Amino acid sequence: MKLGDMLASSRSALVLLPWAVLVGIVLRTDPYGLSEEGAKALLVAWSIGDAVASAAFTLGAPDIRVILFLPLGFLWPGEVLAAKLLTLLAMGAAAIALYRWRRRGDQDEAALLATGLLLIAPLTVEGINALSAAPFLLALCGAATWINEKVVAEKGTIGGWFFFQLLACAAAVSFHPAGLAYPAMLIYTWSQAPRDQRPREYFLIGIPVVVAVALAMRMGWAGIGWLQNPLPAAAAIFNSNGAELALPGADWVAGAALIAVAVAVAVHERRRLFADLTGGSLLLALPFGALAADRIWALLLFALLLYGGLPWLLRACAPLAGRGLMIQRGWLWLILLLVCTAFMRTNRGDFEAARNLRFSAEDQLIRDFADGISTLRATEAPAAAAGSTAPAAGAAPPAAPLGAALAAAPILVASSWPARTSIACKCDGLPLPPAASDPQSQLAMMRGVSYVILGDSVDNRPLAFNFAQMGAQIEVLAREPGGVILHLKPPRAVL
């Protein structure tokens, strides 16, 4: 790395330090608001660090973040905040990589504005709090051009950077369907390279193999909702929490407008974006990720808007140069003021919601169950201690109280969000079983399960119908907007 690049990286890191401190202060320390895939990767890392049965056997294979979270499983097991700080560092690395990419070609102003808006966006702060895969995917996209330059600099030698780029392809694909944009763009780039370049054939063969292996290990993308309405996700760029609720008309209009502008940027700037791996990956992530339009896709869409749209906007207004500062840049200051004010209001609302313990419908359901389990453990611990008194000499040992037996038995819960539930209640969580043909077969599938957290989802309706037919064998503990909490009563002993 050249001295100028090292100095630029050092300055970027120093500029990001106040942002990291401020975001780190407002991070939530409770185990709520997590994404299911992020919680799964963290839970598997904890299980490896504690040398217990890996959660991957019950929850499925996590994405590549489990490797990054693995040191946390040994150093800070059970600490969700440590994983959030690591995600914060990943977002900082993504910001530096995207800034350095965009500032090429006299785009310093656009790079600075785009990076600043990306870092303070409510969706960015929410993604760090939720352990989202978006910061890691953005970091890979931002560094794609730099990594490829390192491969080309090896001059045909198949060295470490070649294999690192293949690993980056597997990592990007494991995160989200939008990650397919990275290997697709890499294949396109190397297919245009001269045939005498030695890595060309290796890449054209190795990338599809690596992608196929990554998808086979993950068995696709677990927990991804396909063909979702993209308007709520796009509207979450300005109103992160409101996208989970019934959206008012203004939010739907905002989501549609953001998608329309992003499509316009993609069409107009396609030649410039396809000039390198980073721009092409951001561009292709828009159609690939639209198959599962969630918060990860929304943050990638916002990055495309910023790093593709702002340079276009500044070039279009270049004829205004020399007509005075207010005419040349006054309109830009006004836009920035409005956008930053909207971001600040949303970030403040999210912070106050966390401080006042206001949760989403899903998290409220998980929290109520975790509080109930904590109360159960607290009340059964004294009973277990009382039942453990030594019997008199020659007397038969007393039967263990029911409370002591329940406290000693592990709590097994089947949940719509098993990883998030396991972290919140510190118990063993399992995914929901498939819907059986009849209630008795369904009950046989639930052997050993004590509780069920059933989310309010269309996919869960056949399962909910079976539970409703079980009658006295099922007890409804809570019915909330996010779903229901069920207790499976143990079968009575037959004398």
Image (tube, rainbow, N blue to C red):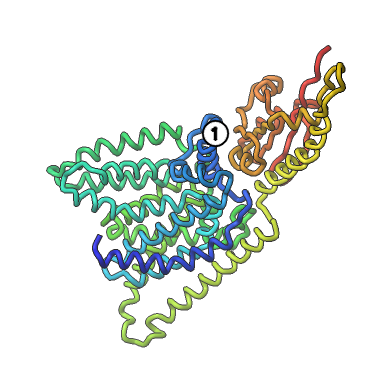
**Closer to the camera in the image, 124 or 316:** 124
Position of 293 relative to 303 (above/below): above
Residue at the bottom extreme? 324
Screen quadrant of the C terminus:
top right
Residue at 73% x, 39% y is 373
x and y percent of residue 121 in the render? 50, 63
x and y percent of residue 240 in the render? 57, 58
**Closer to the camera in the image, 425 or 440:** 425
Residue at the left extreme? 196
x and y percent of residue 298 in the render? 48, 54
Q: Secondary structure at mark 1?
A: loop
Judge from the rendering whether residue 134 lies leftward or rightward of residue 156; answer left or right: right
Any part of residue 450 in sight: yes
Screen quadrant of the N terminus:
bottom left
Residue at 26% x, 57% y is 275
Residue 90 picture quarter: bottom left
Which residue is denoted by mark 1 in the rendering? 55
**Closer to the camera in the image, 40 or 44:** 44
Residue 306 picture quarter: bottom left
Residue at the top extreme? 495
Three-letter code for the amino acid on which mark 1 is drawn:
Ala
Residue at 35% x, 45% y is 168
Residue at 73% x, 38% y is 485
